[in-house]
Amino acid sequence: MITEIKEYAVYHEDEILELYASVGWTAYTDEPEILRKGFEHSMLTLGAYEGEKLVGLIRTVGDGYTIVFIQDLLVLPAYQRKGIGAALMQSVLARFPHVRQIELAADTAQGTAAFYRSQGFQEMSEIGCCAFMRT
């Protein structure tokens, strides 16, 4: 099981590309230089480690006062459903208890909505809001 959640301070492209590829996020792995720049400009990135191995990651953007956007939350498939994603999420939420707006966008994969609901999130439509995205 994981031994530690800590700030992901030094970018290691090989382990990041392995993690993103393992969950099928090829839009990221197709442009590794863009992904690296995204990490450089992130507000907070935390890694979950089993020993020295990176097994999960959460990355946030925003200002840390009025809004935090959870950009990425990923866990290696072999380590999923072991509480690692929840531990990463709770670590971020604990760092920003004063921020009213903590947002994320997620796919519609089975279990995704249930996971985020279990972490205290609601769909925007449930609180009288909607979301827009331009790609």
Image (cartoon, grey):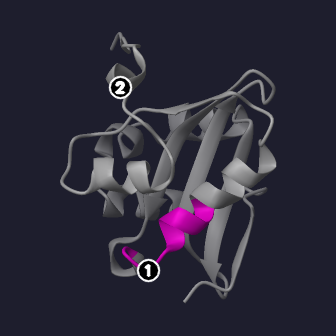
Q: Is residue 21 left or right of residue 119?
A: left
| Quadrant including the N terminus | bottom right
In the picture of the structure, the residue carrying the numbered disc 2 is 126
Q: Which residue is mark 1?
A: 82
| Residue 11 in sight from this viewpoint | no
Q: Which residues are magenta?
A: 80-88
Q: Position of residue 62 (x, y in %)?
A: 69, 26
2 or 1: tag closer to the N-terminus? 1
Where is residue 69 drawn, in percent x and y? 59, 31
Secondary structure type for disc 2: helix
Q: Amino acid at mark 2?
A: Glu
Residue 72 makes an appearance in the image: yes
Query: Where on the picture, by quarter, is residue 80?
Result: bottom left
Magenta residue check for 86: yes
Mark 1 residue element: loop
* The quadrant where residue 60 appears: top right
Is 101 magenta? The answer is no
Check disc 1: other Cα within 10 Å, few if <14, some if 14-19, many if 20+.
few
User: Which residue corresponds to the image point at 65% horizontal and 64% vertical from the top-left?
Assistant: 47
Residue 64: % across, % down: 78, 30
Foreground: 7 or 105? 105
Q: Residue at x 71, y 31 (%)?
A: 41
> Where 44 falls versus 87 (above or below)?
above
Farthest front residue? 127
Which residue is drawn at the image coordinates 79% and 49% (left, top)? 95
**Which three-letter amino acid code belongs to the residue tagged 1?**
Lys
Q: Residue at x 61, y 45 (%)?
A: 59
